[in-house]
Amino acid sequence: MQIRSLPQQEILVRKLESIHELAEEERQVLRDLALRIVELPARTDFIHEDDRPTESCLLLDGLICRYKIVLSGKRQIMSFHTPGDIPDLESLFLSVIDHNHAALAPSRVAFISHRDLRHLIRRFPNIAEAFWRDTLIDGGIFREWVVNIGRRNAYQRLAHLFCEIMMRLRAMELVEDNSYEFPVTQAELGDATGLSHVHVNRTLTELRQDGLVEIRRSRVNVLDWERLKQAAEFDPAYLHQKGVDLS
Amino acid sequence: MQIRSLPQQEILVRKLESIHELAEEERQVLRDLALRIVELPARTDFIHEDDRPTESCLLLDGLICRYKIVLSGKRQIMSFHTPGDIPDLESLFLSVIDHNHAALAPSRVAFISHRDLRHLIRRFPNIAEAFWRDTLIDGGIFREWVVNIGRRNAYQRLAHLFCEIMMRLRAMELVEDNSYEFPVTQAELGDATGLSHVHVNRTLTELRQDGLVEIRRSRVNVLDWERLKQAAEFDPAYLHQKGVDLS
DNA sequence: CGCAATATTGACCATCATCAATTGGCGTGG
DNA sequence: CCACGCCAATTGATGATGGTCAATATTGCG
């Protein structure tokens, strides 16, 4: 999940421009933000329930998920985050974190202080709007996950997940030839879709046999986008991407 | 679900104060907002996928849900909304609606124009923050629903839902003697929890037999709050209510 | 090369869905 | 006031989807 030849100051600009119009001055102040870069090894929990962070983290490279553990020990992954995302942007206004953040793959993140972010949104209402919009899209993605887990079977759930990640990576130009890096284990796919890893395995076999997707060592290769979308009943409207939904 | 002796201009103030501090001037401009009052009969769809509203609606009285339908015809309810909520506040920044809103019970809503809301948040950053915070809490509730549906069984799911609604209504002082109005059918409970209405019925019977809750004609009566919370593994932190989480 | 994590497969079982029939509650019109 | 009708709730019977347990194969990596 490399953003090749894209300087790190450019990542946030590209992300926000995929959902909202920015002026050149706004792009520039985003590029000038102070970033505290941290490298996270795979399988690192780095933000925990009950934390009260003073920074938010922009994912530059890698893969992050947010999850909760229930008492029975089961894990539910509630979201995946790809480069450009700020998974804990909400901590700017919800001071106590209510779930965990983990890097699934080796990742590079850039922490931005809440002080700087507050300063930014006070001075640039249009940037505030872009951030707010981003958190709202996040909410829309959660809603769609509720639908996915609540009302679709295993086959559709996985197909839908692959569609969603495809569209989100595409907006950041991280998809090549209908194929993208997605370094998750089958157990993690199960934790995200509310399935057991055994059933994920069987369902992935089906998807492969049907010629829809192929998953080889952390890479998703979409073989038949149209049929995959159809199987998943995928409608990208909820992602509110510019140029996709015409808002 | 009546807010007794509370004038309608006060409802939004009470709601926002349950999650954020307001100054008297801010309370006053909230009271002065122009409201277009509409009465909705039970079972009315009133905002639809693909709509581009120019107003957002504040629920004054009744019960609203948001839902999507999947191709198989199944419905997934993604949220319930109680008085004080602005279920479509996000339409202020996501111009195309991606799901449906319906009144489940006879309801009274107050439409507020986006123009007025934009004016408000430009002039009062602290009100903007309260609204933003509200949409973030909304997102937190969706995340918890993902966990609920993905990793808990029928018994826990329903218990958790009753806990959540209890806490939210309590913040608006709509709970009396551990009992509250919640006019939903068992089919609707199923649509919200990803269960069939038959299984909801059986599970409610269990909850009643175990002495946790009693549901009689659209009223939920919590008989044993502690054991209900325990059964649901309910932790209200994700609701980010003032005085509950100390943020 | 060898360990450890991950993927795969089989057997069996549990939860919950579906189908179908019956009961109960309640508003409406005669 | 009562009967009808409709919607919601309830119950039983059966079946499907997906979970759990366990064993084996494969892959990545030091």
Image: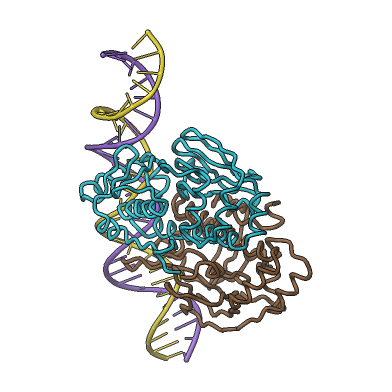
Chain colours: A brown, B cyan, C yellow, D purple
The x, y position of residue D16, in whole percent, is 37, 47
The x, y position of residue B48, in whole percent, is 58, 41
Can see residue B70? no
Residue A247 vertical position relative to residue A131 in the rendered view, above or below: above
Residue A54 vertical position relative to residue A176 in the rendered view, above or below: below
Q: Please give the count of numbered marks on the rendered protein.
A: 0
Q: Is residue D13 left or right of residue B48?
A: left
Residue B199 vertical position relative to residue D23 in the rendered view, above or below: above
Q: Nearer the viewer, residue D18 or B150?
A: B150
Q: Is residue A59 left or right of residue B222?
A: right
The x, y position of residue A148, in whole percent, is 49, 53
Q: Nearer the viewer, residue A80 or A100?
A: A100
| Extreme-right residue of the structure | A24
| Extreme-front residue of the structure | B24
Q: Is residue A76 left or right of residue A207?
A: left
Examine the image and state in which quarter residue B150 appears.
bottom left
The N terminus of chain A lies in quadrant: bottom right
Residue at image coords 28%, 58%: B231
Residue at image coords 42%, 48%: B192
Residue B47 vertical position relative to residue A156 in the rendered view, above or below: above
Examine the image and state in which quarter residue A228 appears.
bottom right
Q: Nearer the viewer, residue A124 or A27?
A: A124
